[in-house]
Amino acid sequence: MRSEYPEKNKRKLCESSLLKRKRIMGHGNQIIGEDADAIHLPNPMIGFRTLADLCQIHRSLPEAATGPPYFYYENVASTPKGVWSTISRFLYDMKPEFVDSKFFCAAARKKGYVHNLPIKNRFPLVPLPPQTIFGAFPMTRRWWPTWDDRTKLNCLQTCIASATITERIMKALKDYDEDEIPPESVCRYVLYECRKWNLVWVGKKKVAPLEPDEVEMLLGFPRDHTRGISRTDRYKSLGNSFQIDAVAYDPLVLKDRFPNGINVLSLFSGIGGAEIALYRLGIPMKNVVSVEILEVSRNVMRCWWEQTNQRGNLYHLADVQDFNADRLEHYISSFGGFELVIGGSTCNNLVSSNRHHRDGLKGKESSLFYDYFRILDLVKGIMARYN
């Protein structure tokens, strides 16, 4: 798959694979769907689920999409127009499931998922994480001003507010008594910065960004999961990770289907959010092939694997672009294939905060989605031959 301009050529190669699949299925030679078609985000963003009544919703899957292997793909919900239409089209024309993690924890995180997991009998992880800011950080209540009406935090980012920002907020409030409501313009400025940077009140007229261990807790990771690496790397790796409680809602259905455990292909593994979700669900992992480009993230995952005394085998690879059919065939022949292919490719060229290179799936980083499709397509093809 490597080429001189991989981000330009990947789509063409994947289009060829997609056309081949459609011809085999008798769907002709046309790629169905248009990239310009917009998939509208639902409101509220609860996907195929509700936590209130756990209603059972039925959906039908295309024959080519039925598992195993089951697959699970994740990325940011708010993307340039046509991105989710393209993702859906390559992943068996399946409708994305958009979910905001604020329905699972005290922080928002709007994500889209395409997967072929059954959607009946899904339940959230228990115990439930704190659902509000005060539930997560009760010590902040004494300092929280009445005019700050936040109950949930915004999406947790890869970076935090600088000391300059928190100092400006202190200066803006210094002339007002503790019980006095500042002028509307001051309140508006302070709340804007607090929402943007997820600042919490830690003293009299004093706000601060979240500490890495607090971000870990909000995202469902074990305490000190990323401890031992730099603060910058901690925030970056956590900001790019799964919200475990939101993700674990879906693969729970695998527990009864595979009581002896599963083999997992984890693409763009990061610090192991998918693996931790499976572990918390009580699903044994017999073999995990984890593909992650950053050594610091691979080290975090390896430490967690060893500290939790996992009985299965963990295989680490660095680059999805070097993951070819020969390597896949080696693993599939060694332990019989994968029950789950899970991952979320980088969103660098998709997020609205990237004003200079928001190029969608044409971008250098976000074009790695096509490697997810390529590898999934190879897995299904190789496993079909073995079966």
Image (tube, helix red, strand yellow):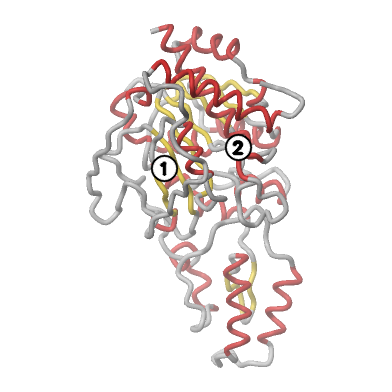
Q: Secondary structure at mark 2?
A: loop
Residue 285 marker: none
Residue type (three-letter) at the residue carrying disc 1: Pro
At label 2, counting other C-alpha atoms closer than 10 Å, the crowd grade (few under 14, some 14-19, many 20 or more) is many
Residue drawn 31% across the image and 48% down it: 49
Give the x, y percent position of residue 321.
66, 25
Residue drawn 60% across the image and 68% down it: 199
Give the x, y percent position of residue 279.
44, 34
Give the x, y percent position of residue 208.
64, 69
Residue drawn 65% across the image and 52% down it: 158
At label 1, counting other C-alpha atoms closer than 10 Å, the crowd grade (few under 14, some 14-19, many 20 or more) is many
Q: Where, quadrant-wise, is the N terminus in this rendering?
A: top right
Q: Residue furthest front?
A: 29
Taking the image as shown, residue 52 lies to the left or right of residue 107, namely left
Total count of labels: 2
Question: In this picture, is 143 found above or below 244?
Answer: below
Question: In this picture, is 350 found above or below 32?
Answer: below
The CA distance from mark 1 to mark 2 is: 22 Å
Question: In this picture, is 234 found above or below 307?
Answer: below
Taking the image as shown, residue 176 lies to the left or right of residue 132, namely right
In the image, 329 versus 362, the foreground residue is: 362
Q: Mark 1 and 2 residues: CB-CB less than 8 Å, in contact? A: no
Judging by the rendered image, the residue that carries numbered circle 2 is: 270
Q: Where, quadrant-wise, is the C terminus in this rendering?
A: top left
Residue 96 marker: 1
Q: Can the viewer see residue 348 in this picture?
A: no
Q: Can the viewer see residue 303 in this picture?
A: yes
Taking the image as shown, residue 364 lies to the left or right of residue 262, namely right
Residue type (three-letter) at the residue carrying disc 2: Gly
Among the two numbered marks 1 and 2 on one chain, the one whose residue lies closer to the N terminus: 1
Give the x, y percent position of residue 270.
60, 37
